[in-house]
């Protein structure tokens, strides 16, 4: 565990430090106040500490439990149960996703409450949950992922002609923010866990691709929100 902590700390510092130094350099060039300078340094240190603790939690808790749940689901011999659990886990993970919260807050701040924050979050979560469930069905029935991706983006293209213009950009951002540090580990671990106990399934070709499919869900659900609101 100590070695994992050291490795995680090293990775986080390598990710955060260059950006922090670049921002500090810009702050010095444009002559920002010392209070803002100190606040940024403090915030950067807190970001490093928070990310280290979060990633350790992912390695110790989320990934193992996701794989364990995924490997246990097929043993119940119920496709409906697998789909329901996959939807529930991905739905809750998306609700807890920090990136989704940030996006909804920013949209709410510039739209003057014109777009409901809670409705947007629920819409994104439902989109992720639905497509993760579809991904589970793809694994079970061995459907090539290219067909699902093609169908999903054809629906996105068609909806782009029907939805309100302001929802189109939001929809694509919604697809991006779902691939965050909370949702990705759970979905990947769940898929790999299911594939690991199913015979004649490849962990590489069947266990991956879930995030790509899951990111289509919020795009479609937010566009539908723009159609019906």
Image: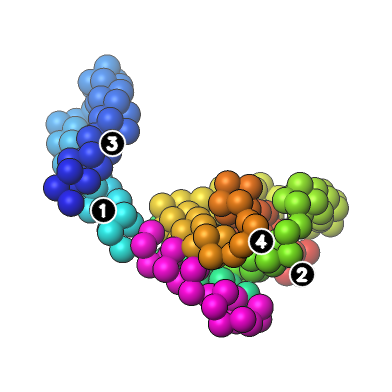
- Which residue is label 2 attached to? 228
Of 101 and 205, which appears nearest the observer? 205
Task: Judge the density around disc 2: few (<14), some (14-19), many (≥20) Cα neighbours within 10 Å.
Answer: few
In the image, the segment drawn in magenta is 62-82
- Magenta stretch: dominant SS? helix
Where residue 61 sits: x, y (%)?
31, 63
**Which of the marked residues, 1 or 2, is nearer the chain's N terminus?**
1
- Which residue is label 4 attached to? 139
Q: Secondary structure at mark 1?
A: helix
Q: Residue at x 25, y 25 (%)?
A: 21
Q: Residue at x 54, y 78 (%)?
A: 75
CA–CA distance in space, label 3 to label 2: 44 Å
CA–CA distance in space, label 1 to label 2: 42 Å
Residue 59 among magenta residues: no
CA–CA distance in space, label 4 to label 3: 32 Å
Task: Judge the density around disc 4: few (<14), some (14-19), many (≥20) Cα neighbours within 10 Å.
Answer: many
- Which residue is label 3 attached to? 11
Between marks 4 and 2 in the image, the one whose residue lies nearer the viewer? 4
- Which residue is label 1 attached to? 56
**Which of the marked residues, 4 or 2, is nearer the chain's N terminus?**
4
Residue 79 among magenta residues: yes
Between marks 1 and 4 in the image, the one whose residue lies nearer the viewer? 4
Q: Give the numbered dot on residue 3.
A: none
Instruction: Give the residue furthest to the top.
Output: 29
Instruction: Give the residue furthest to the front.
Output: 199
**Which of the marked residues, 3 or 1, is nearer the chain's N terminus?**
3
Report whether 141 appears left or right of 36: right
Image quadrant of residue 37? top left
Where residue 118 sits: x, y (%)?
52, 71
Task: Judge the density around disc 3: few (<14), some (14-19), many (≥20) Cα neighbours within 10 Å.
Answer: some
- Are discs 4 and 3 less than 8 Å apart at CB? no
Q: Secondary structure at mark 4?
A: helix
């Amino acid at each position: 565990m100590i070695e994992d902590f050291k490795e995680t700390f090293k990775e986080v510092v390598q990710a955060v430090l260059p950006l922090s130094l670049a921002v500090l350099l810009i702050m010095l060039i444009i002559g920002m106040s010392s209070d803002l300078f100190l606040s940024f340094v403090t915030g950067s240190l807190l970001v490093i500490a928070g990310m280290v603790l979060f990633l350790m939690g992912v390695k110790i808790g989320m990934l193992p439990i996701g794989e364990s749940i995924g490997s246990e689901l097929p043993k119940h011999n119920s496709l409906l149960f697998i789909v329901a659990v996959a939807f529930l886990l991905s739905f809750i993970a998306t609700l807890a996703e920090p990136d989704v919260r940030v996006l909804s807050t920013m949209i709410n701040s510039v739209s003057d409450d014109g777009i409901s924050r809670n409705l947007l979050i629920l819409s994104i979560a439902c989109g992720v949950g639905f497509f993760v469930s579809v991904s589970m069905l793809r694994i079970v029935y061995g459907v090539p992922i290219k067909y699902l991706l093609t169908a999903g983006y054809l629906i996105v293209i068609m909806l782009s002609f029907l939805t309100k213009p302001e929802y189109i950009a939001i929809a694509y951002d919604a697809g991006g923010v779902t691939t965050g540090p909370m949702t990705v580990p759970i979905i990947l671990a769940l898929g790999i866990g299911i594939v690991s106990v199913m015979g004649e399934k490849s962990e590489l070709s069947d266990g991956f691709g879930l995030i790509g499919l899951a990111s289509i869900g919020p795009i479609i659900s937010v566009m539908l929100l723009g159609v019906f609101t």
